[in-house]
């Protein structure tokens, strides 16, 4: 059994399409097919059910896949550890975020303190981030809320209040806090269902007897601030997304603890490279400074 066979198997298993896998691996389809066949001969059983160019993992392949993933993950971790031991620079720090309001500040701090660290960031859903973490394809995910899985560890780095944002000139703009009952007749702008902040707010509003009337629902949390500022509606905004330059007034919610937990996730058992550890320290220091300012 060869390392190349396992790498090819992993790609075909994930794509379940020989042509696409060959294109991604930059090899010919016939070469890829022969490599997979040799692997099946080595293990003594077929790993795929075949229908033309489409393949589907069979029972044997499904059992074999997680072991191959773990084996290749451990080898990659070993390579990274050796790079650190011999003081070789980390190629690229792979990061995922599911909420981006604090990301520019964190990356600016990282560039300022560790200019040698290169990074690549993707914004994904919670489910997509968990898949990449489990595969060992990313170093960290910065997300809200934390995820509770045996294969993923996390650290809560910040707890931010969720505030009611109203435009300047609004009837509540002179207040420092508001009850949910007082805003039940308002029109709201916000993100779509499925975003943690939206689902949390809707659930809390339901406990006091109303469902917010949304006149705008989107996929870009940053756009909500602009819509509030334009007077389209009021919104629920995490404290981390407050922008003092905008003409928006923010109020605390009375009688309910509406907060957003921000967490840093990583794969359980993953080797934390020197660059990844430096990124983690930057994240912790940034959110510690936010907490200090809040007090």
Image (tube, grey):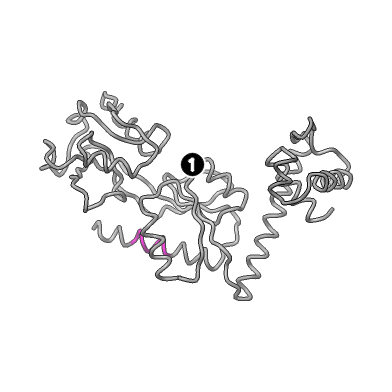
Classify 286 as above or below 203.
below
Q: x, y percentage for residue 216?
A: 31, 31
Q: Residue at x 29, y 28 (%)?
A: 214
The residue labelled by disc 1 is 125
Q: Regarding mark 1 in the picture, which secondary structure is present there?
A: loop
Q: x, y percentage for residue 97?
A: 46, 50
Q: Is residue 167 left or right of residue 4?
A: left
Q: x, y percentage for residue 229?
A: 21, 42
Residue 189 found in image quarter:
top left
- Could you say which is closer to the camera, residue 243 or residue 127? 243
Q: Is residue 168 left or right of residue 207?
A: left
Q: Residues within 10 Å of mark 1 (few under 14, many from 20)?
A: some
Q: x, y percentage for residue 136?
A: 61, 53
- 21 in the magenta segment: no
Residue 167 found in image quarter:
top left
Residue 176 found in image quarter:
top left
- Could you say which is closer to the camera, residue 230 or residue 283? 230
Q: Is residue 70 left or right of residue 103?
A: right
- 284 in the magenta segment: yes
Q: Main secondary structure of the magenta part?
A: helix
Q: Read off the magenta span.
A: 282-288
Quarter in which the C terminus is drawn = bottom left
Classify 281 as above or below 170.
below
| Residue farthest along the bottom direction in this orientation | 86
Count of labels in the image: 1
């Amino acid at each position: 059994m060869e390392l190349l066979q396992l790498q090819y198997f992993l790609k075909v298993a994930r794509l379940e399409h020989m042509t696409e896998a060959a294109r991604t691996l930059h090899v010919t389809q016939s070469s890829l097919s022969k490599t997979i066949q040799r692997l099946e001969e080595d293990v003594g059983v077929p790993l795929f059910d075949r229908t033309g160019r489409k393949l589907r993992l069979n029972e044997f392949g499904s059992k074999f896949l997680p072991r191959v993933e773990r084996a290749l993950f451990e080898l990659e971790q070993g390579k990274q550890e050796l790079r650190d031991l011999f003081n070789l620079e980390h190629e690229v720090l792979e990061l995922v975020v599911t909420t981006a309001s604090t990301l520019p500040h964190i990356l600016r701090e990282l560039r300022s303190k560790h200019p040698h660290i290169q990074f690549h960031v993707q914004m994904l859903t919670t489910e997509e981030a968990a898949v990449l973490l489990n595969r060992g394809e990313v170093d960290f995910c910065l997300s809200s809320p934390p995820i509770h899985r045996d294969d993923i560890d996390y650290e809560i780095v910040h707890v931010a209040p969720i505030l009611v944002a109203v435009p300047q000139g609004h009837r509540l703009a002179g207040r420092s806090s508001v009850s949910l009952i007082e805003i039940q007749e308002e029109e709201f702008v916000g993100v779509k269902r499925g975003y943690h902040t939206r689902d949390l707010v809707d659930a809390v509003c339901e406990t006091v007897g109303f469902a917010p009337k949304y006149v705008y629902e989107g996929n870009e949390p940053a756009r909500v601030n602009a819509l509030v500022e334009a007077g389209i509606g009021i919104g629920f905004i995490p404290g981390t997304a407050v922008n003092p330059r905008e003409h928006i007034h923010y109020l605390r919610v009375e009688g309910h603890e509406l907060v957003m937990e921000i967490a840093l996730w990583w794969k359980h058992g993953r080797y934390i490279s020197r660059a990844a550890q430096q990124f983690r320290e930057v994240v912790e220091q940034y959110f510690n400074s936010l907490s200090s300012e809040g007090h």
